[in-house]
């Protein structure tokens, strides 16, 4: 790549990067700040449009203000710019030299590199920077391949991996300018406000720009970009109809158990391998997730089908076949994403009696929580079904905590020596946050 073009890109991209203002602080920032003084590269991955570039801008402010770093020590480049299409691994050294020439930085340098996975072999250059230069590198990418064993091996001991999720309910309240604390749960007006905003959160989801302008039509374009740019193009998928049909079916059936065989027959492909490859591709770009049945038998885990969830409930609503919302599955999807945001090891579970628990959370070798999600327990048979499944979890897998998340019911139920906590979902989403 020509030196003048590199110079143009560096000056233009950095100017736009630093001009971004009014961003909402992300909860994950505090975790990342612990690693700023260390030399390891920070790898930030997550769904397209989920806020990765904004997070890098926020981290840049943290670094400049918190560590007195001059702006001349900052490099930013977004490899999704069409002018970077011919950028190869051979251009990294000229890029570095051009940056030194333009900025003349003194001391430690901070590189922010957006969507770097577009450059084959990028990890080798990062590895060399780590070994030979005083540079702290922040990298983003919209593909889980960035966390692949190959790249992890090349950067062993030289990287910290961060997955950024769409906005949590706590972050949604922040962007809406709604101030609250622990006492708000007990003040009628504040509680009503939280419940109203929770309904908005379900409607608009967690994509930052969608929340800012309150416009869910953006989600259809996000979906097209993810499917065409991140899945079809990147994985060279020829049969677009098959992958689109599969995606729409999954979005319409959140929280359901789906086998390869069932999905194969649904989209009419000849091979189970094709289905698996499609599912892997959709997972690699953080669009869908699959959780396994919990069992102490590895064989049983492998041979039981997975349950499917989407990165964002509003996105799944925008693209699904259904004309009416299944609030039970929407709530369940919200709980799954929140558990992943909290970095929990999550499974679903079935008792010997065939009763299903929506989520069990494993910590070490033990089951820490068993969680059922139900919009309402007003129906006697529904309440009994949820309770009995949790009682089985206590008996068979010794779950420490038993929880039912509902729309608005809150109480404790004691059955023999078992205590079941019934909590409104909107409150549970905030209980472990910094309030």
Image (cartoon, grey):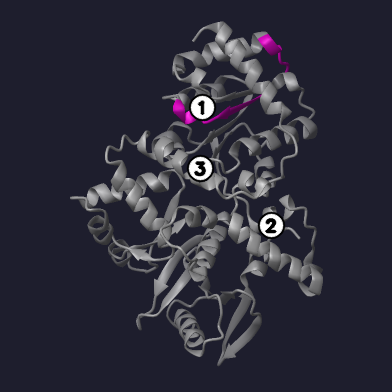
Depth check: give the residue in front, 299 or 268: 268
Q: Residue tagged by mark 1?
A: 80
Tell whether 24 sits left or right of 76.
right
User: Local crowd at mark 3 within 10 Å, few (<14), some, or many (≥20)?
Assistant: some
Label of residue 222 in the image: 3
Does the magenta run of residues contain 103? yes
Tag 2 residue: 170
Q: Residue furthest front?
A: 323
Residue 364, visible in the rendered structure:
yes
The Cα atoms of the two marked residues, 2 and 3, are separated by: 23 Å
Q: Residue furthest left?
A: 270
Q: Earlier in the sequence, mark 2 or mark 3?
A: 2
* Rendering coords of residue 429 (x, y %): 64, 64
Please, is residue 311 above or below residue 99 in the view?
below
Local crowd size for mark 1, using a 10 Å CA cut-off: few (<14), some (14–19), many (≥20): few
Q: Earlier in the sequence, mark 1 or mark 2?
A: 1
* Pick the front one: 137 or 403: 403
Q: Are marks 1 and 2 in contact (CB under 8 Å)?
A: no
Judging depth in this view, the residue of 94 and 24 nearest the camera is 24
């Amino acid at each position: 790549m020509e030196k003048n073009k590199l110079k143009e890109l560096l000056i233009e991209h950095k100017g736009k990067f630093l001009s971004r203002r009014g961003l909402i602080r992300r909860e994950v920032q505090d975790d990342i700040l612990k690693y700023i003084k260390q030399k390891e590269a920070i790898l930030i991955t997550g769904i397209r449009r989920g806020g990765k570039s904004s997070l890098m801008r926020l981290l840049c402010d943290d670094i400049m203000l918190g560590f007195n770093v001059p702006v001349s020590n900052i490099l930013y480049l977004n490899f999704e710019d069409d002018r970077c299409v011919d950028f190869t691994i051979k251009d990294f050294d000229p890029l570095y030299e051009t940056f030194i020439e333009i900025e003349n930085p003194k001391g430690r340098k901070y590189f922010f590199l957006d969507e770097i996975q577009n450059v084959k072999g990028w990890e080798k250059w990062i590895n060399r920077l780590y070994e030979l230069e005083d540079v702290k590198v922040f990298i983003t990418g919209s593909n889980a391949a960035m966390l692949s064993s190959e790249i992890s091996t090349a950067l062993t001991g030289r990287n910290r991996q961060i997955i950024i999720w769409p906005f949590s309910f706590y972050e949604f309240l922040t962007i809406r300018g709604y101030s609250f604390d622990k006492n708000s749960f007990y003040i009628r007006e504040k509680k009503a406000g939280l419940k109203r905003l929770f309904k908005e959160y379900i409607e608009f989801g967690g994509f930052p720009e969608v929340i800012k302008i309150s416009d869910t039509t953006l989600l259809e374009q996000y979906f097209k970009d993810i499917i065409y740019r991140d899945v079809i193009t990147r994985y060279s998928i020829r049969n677009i109809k098959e992958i689109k049909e599969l995606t729409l079916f999954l979005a319409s059936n959140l929280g359901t158990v789906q086998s390869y065989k069932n999905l194969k027959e649904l989209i009419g492909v000849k091979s189970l391998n094709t289905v698996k490859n499609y599912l892997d591709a959709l997972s690699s770009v953080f669009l869908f997730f699959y959780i396994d049945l919990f069992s102490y038998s590895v064989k049983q885990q492998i041979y039981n089908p997975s349950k499917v969830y989407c990165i964002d409930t509003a996105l799944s609503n925008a693209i699904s076949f259904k004309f009416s919302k299944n609030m039970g599955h929407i709530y369940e999807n919200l709980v799954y994403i929140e558990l992943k945001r909290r970095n929990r090891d999550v499974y679903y579970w079935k008792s010997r009696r065939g009763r299903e628990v929506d989520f069990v959370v494993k910590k070490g070798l033990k089951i820490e929580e068993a969680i059922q999600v139900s919009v309402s327990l007003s129906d006697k048979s529904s309440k009994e079904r949820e309770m009995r499944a949790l009682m089985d979890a206590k008996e068979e897998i010794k779950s420490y905590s038993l929880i039912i998340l509902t729309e608005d019911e809150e109480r404790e139920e004691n059955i023999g020596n078992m205590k079941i906590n019934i909590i409104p979902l909107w409150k549970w989403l905030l209980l472990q946050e910094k309030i």
